[in-house]
Amino acid sequence: MKTRDHSKLFQDLAAEYAQHSPTSAMLHTRAQQTMIDGGSHPLRLIRPFPPRLVRAQGAYIYDADGHSILDFWQGHYTNILGHNPAVITTTLARAFEADWGLQTGFTDQLQIELAEIICKQTQSERVRFTTSGALATMNAIMLARAFTGRELVMKVGGGWHGAQPWGLVGVNFANRANPWRIESQGLPSSLVNEVIITRYNRPDILRAHFQQYGDRLACFIVEPFMGAGGFMPATREYLRTARELCDHYGVVLIFDEVISGFRFRAGTLGALYNIQPDLTTLAKIVGGGMPVAAVAGRAAILQLCGRAGGNRVRFMGGTYSAHPASLLAAKTLLAYLVEHEQEIYPRLAQLGAQMRQVIEAAFRAEGIFARCTGYPNDALGGSSFAVPQFPYDENQSLDSPDEVNDPGLCDVELRDHIFQLALLLEDVHVVHGGGAVSMAHTEQDIARLGDAAQRVARRIKKYL
C-alpha cells in the first residue's frame, strides 16, 4: 500500500506549536548555538523543538511556557513511581545533609545491600554494576564472547540494546529487501559480519539461524518484552526455543531487561516465563531515577571480569559506577517495590489496560483504525505499556518489529511524530506514539489522555 504524505499536516501542527510554546522555541534556538541539534539525546529532541522543563512531579512535567504536561514517557520508562517520588528524594536529601552521596571512589555497604536484593530478586549468582544500559549490554556481550571463545552475536532485528558496537546493527527498519543494517558510521566494517539478525517471535526462523550459525555463536541477546522495537512480549514458545537452542549449541543466553526488569514484577520478566538466562542486563527502573545499571547472572561467566578469571574481560564499570547517591536511590526503590509488590503491579496493569482502551476508542470514534501494542500475554498477566499502531490492513499481525516499523504495513510517521506533536498541543507527552503508566497516574489522567487522543484524531483525520 502507498504510504501517506504527512508533510502538510506536520507543517500546520509545527506552526501552531511554535505559538503554543514560544519560550521553549526560543530556548531551542539558543541551545542549538552550543549543542548539536540543541541537546544530547535524539529521542528528547522532539521535532520541531522539545518543551524545556523547569520541574517534574508525579505524572506531570512543567515547562518554561507554564504548561502542565501529562507525561507518559516518565524518564525513558524509568520512573515507575512517577517523577521525583518522595520515597526517593527525601532519602537522598537526608543523605546529602549527612555528608553522604557524592562520589568517594571507595566501596561501601550500600553496594553489598543492593547486590543482595538484585541477586535474590533475579535468582542470579553474581552482579556487577555500571552506569547505563548500553554499557551493561556491551559488557554482557564481551563476557559471552570471552566465555565461549566465539565471536558471533545474534540479536533480533529491531531490538535496541543501546549505543554500543554490537547494539548498533539492525535497529531501524530500512526496507523489505534489506530491512536491517549498521546504524552508525565510525564502526568497523567487519561488524556487519559479527552480528546475526534474527526475527522476533518466529521460533522456526530462530531454529534455522541456530542450525546455520550455532557452533559459532557466542550469545543470543533478546528482550523478553520488546522496547523500542514495538512494545510487545515474547511468546512462551519463542523464549523456550531460545533457551533450548542455547543449551544445545553452548551459546550464552542474555535477556536484555533494561526496560522490563522490575516493570512487571519486583524482579525480572524471565521468571514469569520460568526461564533463567545465563546473563541479565538491568537499568532504568533499577536506578530509581539515578544512573545505575548492572549485569547479573552466572558466576562462572561474570568471574571473567574478576581476579579469579584473570580479569580477562575489562568490565571496569567506570568512575561513576556504584555511585553512592545512585546506589542509595536504587536500594530505596527496589526495597520499596519488593515490599509493595502486591499492590503496585496489579495497579499498573489496570491503568495500562485502561490506557490501551481509551487510545483505541478515541481513534475508532473518529473513524481511524488504531490498535495498540503493549498488551500482555499469558506469561505477563498485565502490562503498563500502550503504543498505538496504525496498520493499513486491520488484519495485520503486530508481534514483531518487522511489522510495526515497516512503513509499507503501518503508518510509522503518524505514530512516531504526528501523534506526538499533536498531543503536545493538548499538553500530553508521549514517545513512539505512546508510553507507560506509573503509580503516580490516576484514572482521571487516563481519561484526559483519551479525550486528548480523540481531539487529535478529529484534527488529523481530514488530512488522511
Image: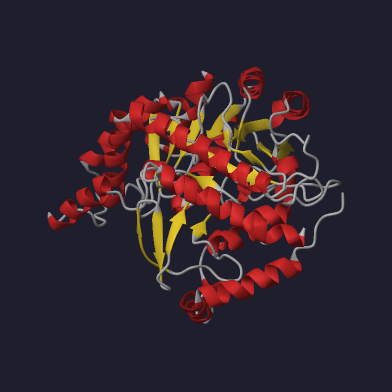
Q: Can see residue 444?
A: yes
Asked which quadrant contains residue 440, the reply is top left
Give percent across and percent down for residue 389: 68, 45
The residue under the point 35% across, 51% down is: 58
The residue under the point 63% across, 32% down is: 220
The residue under the point 22% across, 43% down is: 108
15, 239: nearer the viewer:
15
What color scheme is it?
secondary structure
Question: On the rendered structure, is 157 left or right of 36?
Answer: right
Asked which quadrant contains residue 400, the reply is top right
Find the residue positioned furthest to the front. 365
Give percent across and percent down for residue 416: 65, 55
Give percent across and percent down for residue 64: 41, 72
As drawn, 100 above or below 21: above
As drawn, 14 above or below 120: below
Question: On the rendered structure, is 42 left or right of 186?
Answer: left
Q: Can see residue 142?
A: no
Q: The C terminus lies in which quarter of the figure?
A: bottom right
Find the residue positioned furthest to the left. 98
461, 309: nearer the viewer:
461
As drawn, 36 above or below 355: below
Question: On the rendered structure, is 335 left or right of 300?
Answer: left
